[in-house]
Image: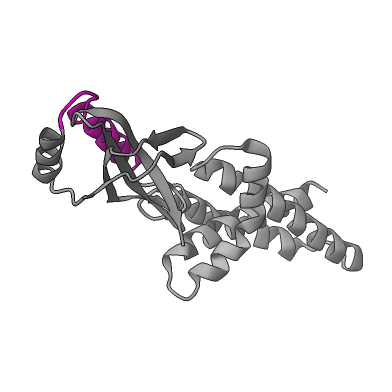
Amino acid sequence: MVRRITLALLWGSGFTALSSLALNLPYVNLGALFVLTPGGLIHDTLLKQSDSAPAILLANFLVYSAFAFVIISSFSILRPARTEDRRVSLWIVFPVAVLVCLACIPTLDPLWPTGMAQLAKKEVQLQEILPLGMDLEQARGVLRSQGISFWERVQESDDDLLTRPDASVSAVAGDRIVVSHIPTDAGQFPCGYRIDVILVFGKEGLLKQRYIHRFRICL
């Protein structure tokens, strides 16, 4: 029983790590993503945490270890354990350990989030340089100085511009709306992030509402 559990844990961890690393490979990454789906579903259903690579890897490890235990147990019933089997188990330890170590390096495994610290820093910076009460010309100058492209329009009627779980933005007729979608390098396979900026200026030309927050884009 101990041998079967050990083998199952080795195969489960090795298969999970290999699938995670395979996300780097073209043509193979979609298959690897499908293989990692069980852990992703468990993660989303039970843990309710976004961008948690350790949780996704752990969930897949448990799923595939259990699956491997069933397969190994089935073969063990049909064929008694041999000395050669124990030697094979020992040889598996080293390659599995290497795969697991590689899968724990964010630069090698795309499942780990990247650029999230820079993303948060950029959000804070934009919130600081675009404070409520600044006038329209100042806001235009700030955006241009940051190399941020944007567009403007005059609101024709009272309406909700944005309704999301984290915030909502509304405008009345005559308000001037400035909008920008800022691309970033932050992401977690297979999704990336942009920063959405919505600025609402009243008829007097002062910023009265703003929305500056990340938005997840999954293709």
Q: Compared to 85, does 42 lie above or below?
A: above
In magenta segment, residue 165: no
In magenta segment, residue 127: yes
The part of the image, by quadrant, that contains residue 133 is top left
Magenta stretch: helix, strand or loop mostly: helix
Q: What is the residue that sits farthest to the bottom in this orientation? A: 27
Left or right for 110, reference 175: right
Q: Is residue 115 visible?
A: no
Q: Is residue 122 visible?
A: yes
Question: Percent x, y for residue 43?
Answer: 63, 44
Q: Compared to 181, does 210 lie above or below?
A: above
Left or right for 185, reference 219: left
Q: What is the residue that sits farthest to the top in this orientation? A: 133
Left or right for 143, reference 68: left
Question: Percent x, y for residue 206?
Answer: 20, 28
| Residue range (magenta) | 115-135
In the image, what residue occupies the spot 69% across and 47% down?
62
